[in-house]
Amino acid sequence: MILPIVTYPDEILTKRAAAVTEITNAVIQLLDDMQETMQAYDGVGLAAPQVGQSLRVAIVETDDESGPLELINPKLIMQEGEAVDVEGCLSFPDVFGTVKRAAKIAVRYVDREGYENELVAHDYAARIIQHEIEHLDGGLFTDRMIRRLTPEELEEYMEEHDDD
Ligand code: CO
C-alpha cells in the first residue's frame, strides 16, 4: 500500500524514533509499504517517521535486483572522511541543497528475518544511509545544509539526474 508522506513541519519528523523490539507482521507490512511508497514517489531512501511511524526503520535504494536495503534499528559504527554533495528529501518537496557527510560508513542493523548485519558503504549510498538514520534521530538535513540550490541550479541538477 502506498502511504502518504509526512512533510515538514510535522512534529513526528523532529522526534527520536523508538527501537523495534520485535519484528512483528506489522513491521514486515511497514517495510513492504515503505518500499511501495518510495517507488511511487521516486525516492532513494525513506524513514518510517516520514510515513507517520515513529520507529527505527528505514529503507535505502540499491542497484540490487532484490530490492532496497532494509535497515531495522540501524547504527553507524564507523564514519570516515568527508564529502559534500546535493541532497533532497521527500518530506521537503522542492528543497535541495549541499550537505557534508562522512564519505565512508559502516552500519550495523537488523534485517527483516531478525538477523544482525553489518555493511560498509561509500559515496552516495553512504550519504543516503546517513540521511535516513538522521531522520530516526529526529534530525533534518535542512538544519545542516551548507547552501540551498537556487531554482536555476535545481533545474540543472534535475536534468543531470533525469536518467537515473
Ligand atoms: Co529525508
Image (tube, rainbow, N blue to C red):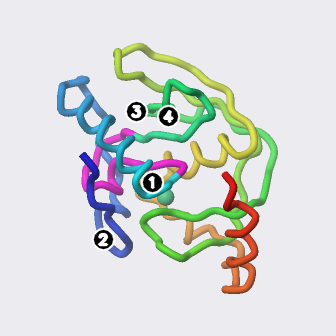
Q: In the image, which residues are magenta? A: 44-57
154 or 27, which lies in front? 154
**Which amino acid type corresponds to the residue marked 1 in the rendered image?**
His
Res. 136 in view: no
Res. 109 in view: yes
The response on whether ligand 1 sits within 8 Å of label 1 is yes
- Mark 1–mark 4 contact, CB under 8 Å? no
Counting from the top left corner in percent of width and height, residue 153 is at 74, 80
Q: Give the number of the mark in front: 2 or 4.
A: 4
Task: Please name the residue shown 75% across and 43% down the image.
Answer: 123
Q: Left or right: where does residue 93 sit relative to residue 97?
A: left
153 or 116, which lies in front? 153
Gap in angstroms between the C-alphas marked 3 and 1: 12 Å
Q: Would you say residue 87 sits in the magenta stretch? A: no
Task: Please name the residue shown 26% across and 29% down the image.
Answer: 28
**Which amino acid type corresponds to the residue marked 3 in the rendered image?**
Asn
Q: Give the number of the mark in front: 3 or 4.
A: 4
Residue that protrudes farthest toward the left in the picture: 25
Task: Please name the residue shown 67% across and 69% down the image.
Answer: 158
Mark number for residue 73? 3
Name the residue tied to disc 2. 10
Within-10-Å neighbours for mark 2: few <14, some 14–19, many 20+:
few
Counting from the top left corner in percent of width and height, residue 33 is at 29, 42
Name the residue tied to disc 1. 135
Q: Earlier in the sequence, mark 2 or mark 4?
A: 2
Q: Give the number of the mark in front: 1 or 4.
A: 4
Counting from the top left corner in percent of width and height, residue 95 is at 56, 75
Counting from the top left corner in percent of width and height, residue 60 is at 52, 40
Task: Please name the residue shown 59% across and 28% down the image.
Answer: 64
Q: Left or right: where does residue 47 sit relative to residue 118?
A: left
The response on whether ligand 1 sits within 8 Å of label 4 is no
Name the residue tied to disc 4. 68
